[in-house]
Image (tube, rainbow, N blue to C red):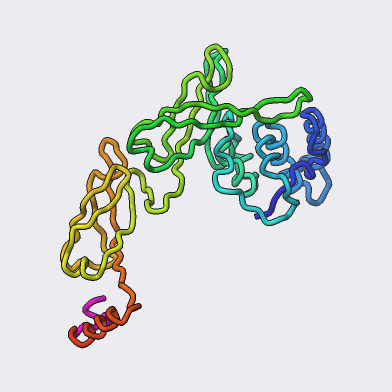
Amino acid sequence: MQFKDYYKTLGVARDAKADDIKKAFRKLARKYHPDVSREPDAEARMKELNEANAVLSDPEKRAAYDQLGKGWQPGQDFRAPPGWDAPFEHAGRGYSPDEEADFSDFFSELFGRMGGARSGRRGGARAAGRGEDHHARVILDVEDAFGGVSRQISLRVPAVDASGRPGYQDRTLNVKIPRGVCPGQVIRLAGQGAPGAPAGDLLLEVEFRPHPRFRVDGRDLLLTLPLAPWEAALGAVVPVALPGGEVRVRVPEGARGGSQLRLRGKGIPGEPPGDVLLDLRIVVPPADTPRAREFYESMSREFTFDPRSTERT
């Protein structure tokens, strides 16, 4: 995917004011609108203009784009850093189906969660005078879902400076994270959205930070449980550290690598709670000492075992 320079598309400077962007878009739209233009690439150019205008005419998207786009050149291979948009608070405005179809992958990658094509959010009707609801993401650790904790989060709130250029101001909130929260769940903070009578709400969409041990599937947790060969062959009771505390797991005799054990109700709390799924992986000790090597040589003589036997596949 290539980086798009929306300022270059509209032919305006990066410090252009909102009125300058509006004038530039209208001028180019008159030239390239497919209904009136005789330019051979009118339709493609109009799509590019609409996309650039959708970003630069929106104070929230423009400020986010300005921060992310520093140092990038048009056409340069681009991938948005994971979670780059999490701190940005936005109104979550949507687009018409025609607009969604015309936006590029670059736009969706950046702004899909900020009211664009991928999020599917649209501003609905609200009471007269009521402030607009704002949206943001909050990135939590898996462990936060097990206790219900308070977290201090920092958000970047849309603002306009004295020269009329859009930007962001930082604000910090103390948020109570409910026990059992899951990815995709929304935490509503009443009155923390746009000003009004009454003020709108702030809707925080929960996302979990990647964990070195656990994978999350709904309320279920998946992890790999390493076993020594003798634990798998003879059976054993082994400790497993979970976010809710350590548990003792009984491994049945003759357990095979690649099989799975289920710990019911030990996943993310809820009604009902999730499970923990343990993928068994047998770890073979290295023959890195004379005694260990002697042991393996003894096993090779004593055991009539062929791991490639079709009966074991």
Secondary structure that dominates the magenta span: loop
270 with respect to 86 (left or right):
left
Residue drawn at (31%, 72%), measured in percent from left and top? 285
Residue drawn at (29%, 44%), measured in percent from left and top? 267
The quadrant of the rendering that contains the C terminus is bottom left
The quadrant of the rendering that contains the N terminus is bottom right
Where residue 162 appears, as percent x and y from the top left, is: 76, 22
Give the vertical position of 21 relative to 223 (above or below).
Answer: above
Q: Nearer the viewer, residue 211 or 245?
A: 245
Report if residue 311 lies within the magenta region.
yes
Q: Residue furthest bottom?
A: 301
- Highlighted magenta segment, given as a residue range: 304-313
Q: Nearer the viewer, residue 24 or 7?
A: 7
101 with respect to 183 (left or right):
right
Give the vertical position of 25 relative to 293 (above or below).
Answer: above
Give the vertical position of 190 relative to 79 (above or below).
Answer: above
Q: Nearer the viewer, residue 298 or 140?
A: 298
Give the vertical position of 289 relative to 40 (above or below).
Answer: below
